[in-house]
Amino acid sequence: MSQVKVPEGRWSWVEIDRGALRRNLRAYKSLLAPRQKLCCVVKADAYGHGAIECARVLHSAGADMFAVATVHEGVELREAGIQAPILILSEPPITAIPQLIEKNIMPTVYTIEFALAYGECAVRAGTVGKYHLAIETGMNRIGVHYADVLEFCRNINFHRGIQCDGVFTHFATAEDVAGWDYKLQCKRFEEAVRALEDAGFDCGTVHCDNTPATMLDPSTHYDMVRVGIGLYGLYPCDSSRSVVKLDPVMSVRARVTRTAHPAMGEGVSYGYTYRVPRTAVQICTLPIGYADGLSRTLSNRMEVLYRGERVRQVGNICMDQCMVAIQQTPIHQIPEAEYGDVMTIIGRDGDAEISADEMARLRGTINYEVVCDFGMRLDKVYL
Ligand SMILES: *Cc1c(COP(=O)(O)O)cnc(C)c1O
């Protein structure tokens, strides 16, 4: 626990286990046929894990493509020297097109205006702009409606400045691959792709699976799958737990910056939502707060790990700090903490563990949001 190199400026940090990231990638590769590609979704700074460092690890471990959400995220990867194909998962503003061409970043396309402007810019630059066509099959978020794809492609296909590198859709309910909603999306996608192919249109790489669909339904792997949350060692749903064993990549830790023994009845933190009880407690301060991703809604409801045991967080979580109470009871004695002792907010300590899933349940959200939030400000330490 204490062997980790702690960042100098502040005693709280996110640990990223590169070995776990590599193992998770291999676990997904093992679900695919050799010709099927793995697109690693590293949007939102790799779900808070650090996109550049994660992309480096994933690329060396066999990632075929990277997917991001914004032009900025794609440019960041290119400027860090990532050479693999990069796909933006939605259609960027037309004003971003010169940057896409310059950095060789593929946009998702679903408007004729964008497609033609992209083609014009590519021709001027003496190149061909590759893109992926998004098909709307039921998520009702982005893409060309499944019934309109053939007409859409006929409208843009004449342009010699663009080339379709892939065709994809995105599932709304992939946690339930037995359900009608999922099956309907599959059917619409399959029919749209077939219509394009029958018309002689080269679809390039056909893909639709996110993490849950990749794990639960091999029949929709097509040419490539797009895996995000699973790479970071988190399960998208309980039914996926038995498919492959994943190792969580992120841990969150902090060192105690102050200890005190306020008298009985003293309040702790803003609003005094916690008061020191009759039994003596040691109040320990940790330099992590809601601006670091530790949601204020967890105040007085969460626990952290200290010496392999659970201790309660007390008082309102502040922007940059929070407090925990070490409380002795007649039946359970915990050694008091000292300045500099490490506490674990997410991760393992001895036999104990606090998972992103546990925190998500407490917050009333999903593990995706928990890890994204911890990416906000904390220093990252790559193991
Ligand atoms: C975010 C995203 C993914 C990855 O989803 P996970 O559930 O994290 O695997 C895949 N495809 C699209 C279009 C996305 O927006």
Image (tube, rainbow, N blue to C red):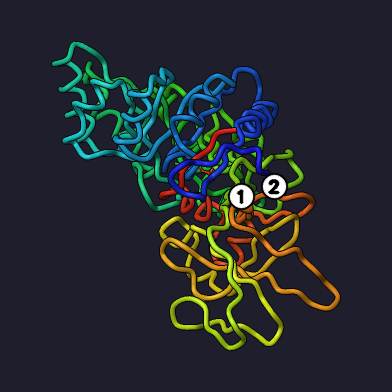
Q: Which residue is mark 2?
A: 240
- Measured Cα–Cα span from mark 2 to mark 1: 7 Å
User: Going by the image, does 177 lie left or right of 60?
Assistant: right
Tags 2 and 1 in contact by the CB under 8 Å rule? yes
Q: Residues within 10 Å of mark 1 (few under 14, many from 20)?
A: many
For the C terminus, the image quarter is top right
Choose top left, top right, bottom left or bottom right for residue 218: top right
Residue 268: tell me if it is visible: yes
Residue that appears at 54% across and 69% down = 298
Q: Residue furthest top?
A: 126
- As drawn, is 292 to the left or to the right of 286? left
What percent of the width, then of the height, locates residue 301? 60, 73
As helix, strand or loop, the secondary structure at mark 2 comes to helix
Split into 4 quadrants, where in the image is the N terminus? top right
Task: Give the residue at x 27% y 28%.
Answer: 154
Q: Tag 2: residue type?
A: Ser
Residue 85 x, y percent position in the rendering: 41, 22
* Label 2: how many Cα within 10 Å (few below 14, some 14–19, many 20+): some
Identified by mark 1, the residue type is Pro
Is residue 381 depicted above or below 182 in this figure? above
Asked if ligand 1 lies within 8 A of label 1, the reply is yes
Q: Residue at x 63, y 52 (%)?
A: 342
Q: Position of residue 99 (x, y in %)?
A: 22, 27
User: In this rendering, would 329 be left or right of 115?
Assistant: right
**Mark identifier at residue 292:** none
Residue placed most toward the observer, 284 or 304: 284
Q: Which residue is mark 1?
A: 236
